[in-house]
Image (cartoon, rainbow, N blue to C red):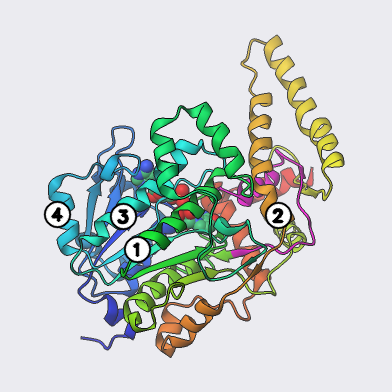
Amino acid sequence: MASRTPIQTFYAGEAIFITGGTGFVGKLLTEKLLRSCPDISRIYLLIRLKKDKCPKSRLDEMFEKPVFDRVKEEVPNFRKKIVPVIGDLETEDFGLSENDENMLINQVSIIFHIAANVRFNENIKTSTMINVNATATILKLAKRMPNLKSLIHTSTIYANCHVKHIKERFYSYPINYKDLIIFTRNLNENIMEEKISRIMSQWPNTYTFTKAIAEGLLRDEMGDLPVGIFRPAIVLSSANEPLVGWIDNMYGPLGITVTSLLGITRFHRYNPDIKANIVPADFTVNGLIASAWDVGNNQFRRGKDTFIYNFVSPDDRPTWNKYRYTLLEANKMYPLRNAVYFPLMIYFKRKIPYRICVWLGHFLPALFIDAINICVNRSPRMWKLYKKLDIFSDATQPFCNNEWKFSTDNVQAMWNRLSEEDQQLFKFSMIEFDWTKYLIDLYMGIRLYLLNENDSTLEMSRIKYKR
Ligand SMILES: NC(=O)c1ccc[n+]([C@@H]2O[C@H](COP(=O)([O-])OP(=O)(O)OC[C@H]3O[C@@H](n4cnc5c(N)ncnc54)[C@H](OP(=O)(O)O)[C@@H]3O)[C@@H](O)[C@H]2O)c1
């Protein structure tokens, strides 16, 4: 057998349970584990049933995506290691069958709890069930696993956006998880919204709030379990592997970026001088893999807050202005064929001029087009679309108009504990990171993987752009 690095050795022979393995971060995590930890025995992927698709066909579709091309080449038999487990986070105990539950309890030694509802303004009941109650279920399962070495809970750096300096420690919250779950089960939606809106007033949305309460749950209930909490910043495309620029999700500021590049929206309430707290998805996944190793290997270091990792970009990260400028420059070279208008990203620091421009530049033209559509017997859709985009844009504003201070001592100490080989194989340090190249690759990734535009459309796009 070829020699193995300490992280590869840690994972050798282990069975991993991943929730959220079908999502953006989860796909990359599954791919990287299969490719770079060759002696893993099994990966159990929690999969919910969707639109009458059986788990096998969901997996077949997932593994057809280009992000799995490399692992197919390097580890041709990788599918043998994947075991789908049917479950839904919204159902009590995930609705696991008895067999599956026993299998997980007896086999699994490492858990990555990644699944979440990441919609910023999801209703509070759904957010609580998926982001809080499901974390309680994971913990309950983990407590029954005799071989558990490590459980990594994926949080977000903005779970604790109610403090200005976010340290790698637990915080207190105005409600505990038990009360929130009781409210969710017993109150109707309106009363719940009313009660919670006061309690969560320090958080900009239900997503960050429920992620915070999930951290509180872990603080109170994890006991001696080997639990780590990984808090990434805004995760964007992969920097290097398995594909440069790969991305398949449009949440957060990226959604706004894409609608701007397509010429659908023009005005945004961002402070261009504020730094964009973005991290590449492959670095995030490497950090997750290393943190499970760190937690499992360093139990003797265990203190209350030892295994909380703030995964943010370093101080030399780009401002939103540099982000905008670099993407627009890349767009000049590689315009989008499907753009409806020349792309503009006009940022406003202040609310009133922003609202005026949104009304004049987004809503009025939408009303005008809808009026024409009604006249020619077509359904009016533009107002609805711009209303949706406006809500979405409002939801991302807090993260693009405010700055926080972050402590990253645990992440840095973990990096220093990695062997040189692991630092290469599971690179997550962003020191001397080339942000300009990354942003150009991000643009190319948006163009190719999100908007399905490849070089065959380039000539046409360039002609259209010049017009
Ligand atoms: N992306 C970011 O910028 C970012 C930043 C910080 C932290 N995070 C955290 O990273 C994690 C992954 O985020 P992501 O960007 O990969 O999100 P994503 O692409 O939306 O993936 C979410 C995953 O959760 C699963 N899931 C959601 N509801 C479920 C349910 N009821 N039952 C079973 N599975 C369910 C989804 O399954 P389906 O495929 O069935 O929908 C999917 O696999 C989350 O915990 C998020 O809070 C993300």
Q: Residue at x 82, y 50 (%)?
A: 349
User: Which residue is tagged 4?
Assistant: 102
Looking at the picture, tell me which residue is in the foreground, 257 or 140. 140
Judging from the image, what secondary structure is the residue with disc 4 in?
helix
- Dividing the picture into quadrants, the one containing residue 45 is bottom left
Query: Is 394 on the left or on the right of 96, as rendered?
Result: right
Is residue 55 placed above or below 160 in the rendered structure? above
> Residue 205: horizontal and vertical position, in percent?
59, 44
First in residue order: circle 3 vs circle 1: 3
> Residue 282: horizontal and vertical position, in percent?
48, 67
**Label annotation for residue 138:** 3
- Dividing the picture into quadrants, the one containing residue 14 is bottom left
Tag 2: Cα neighbours inside 10 Å, few (<14), some, or many (≥20)? many
**Label annotation for residue 222:** 1
Tag 4: Cα neighbours inside 10 Å, few (<14), some, or many (≥20)? some
The stretch of residues the image draws in magenta is 250-278
Are the residues tagged 3 and 4 within 8 Å (C-beta)? Answer: no
